[in-house]
Amino acid sequence: MLRNITHTRRTVVLATSVVFCGVLFLGGVSVNFAQSGFGMSKGLPQHHQAPDFHLQMIDGKAVSKSSLNGQPTLMMFWAPWCHVCQVELPKIHDFHEAVKPHGLQVLSVGFADAKENVVGYIHGHSDVFTFLSAYDVDNIVASDFKIRATPTFVLLDADGSVRLVHPGAGVLHNPKLLSFVEDLVS
């Protein structure tokens, strides 16, 4: 009897661990311990104006909503400790190289970690970070955009309206992003 209870507990713990790891791996959910309440979120509603924001880029220059100069922008909110982000960033690099001649820019926003960790990761992967990269001090911009997971992608059109919010991996297969890019290219 005791052996059956112990076996049942081990089975439940193992099953729970497998499900949790599967959610983290497949769903791209990463928890931010710097702010309470982080988890999956849909972010801002689509077709609403993005909030004004001001960030300092890693090279020391400033970037803001108004400085995007009417260019459509794919923002990627990420953290160095996020394994899904580490997998997605090289894909975003390749995407950026393909779409930048058509006017779509990428802005990576490191958050949910210390600035030195974000900067260190960027410098250690300089071949990937060929796009605009900024650090979100105190997660202010992420909070304004209602970002609750890493990575989360936000597509802004040339007018600064939110066209897509995509938490987790796989944004490059999102039909709304593909349609947006197709319209830009044609």
Image (spheres, rainbow, N blue to C red):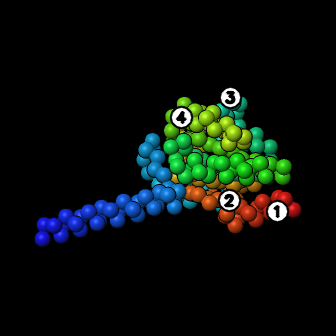
Please indicate whether residue 152 sits to the left or right of residue 156 in the image: left
Q: CA distance from mark 3 to mark 2?
A: 29 Å
Q: Nearer the viewer, residue 131 or 112?
A: 131
Kind of residue indicated by mark 2 = Leu
Sequence-wise first label, 3 or 2: 3
**In this picture, is 77 found above or below 168?**
above
For label 3, the residue is: 60
Residue visible at 46% across and 46% down? 32
x then y, percent, for residue 139: 54, 41
Q: CA distance from mark 4 to mark 1?
A: 37 Å
In the figure, residue 21 lies in which quadrant?
Answer: bottom left
Which type of secondary structure does the marked residue at label 4 adopt? helix
Kind of residue indicated by mark 3 = Gly
Q: Is residue 45 visible?
A: no
Sequence-wise first label, 3 or 1: 3
Residue visible at 84% across and 52% down? 102
Q: Nearer the viewer, mark 4 or mark 1?
A: 4
x then y, percent, for residue 61: 71, 30
For label 2, the residue is: 172
Sequence-wise first label, 4 or 1: 4
Q: CA distance from mark 4 to mark 3?
A: 16 Å
Q: Which mark is residue 183?
A: 1
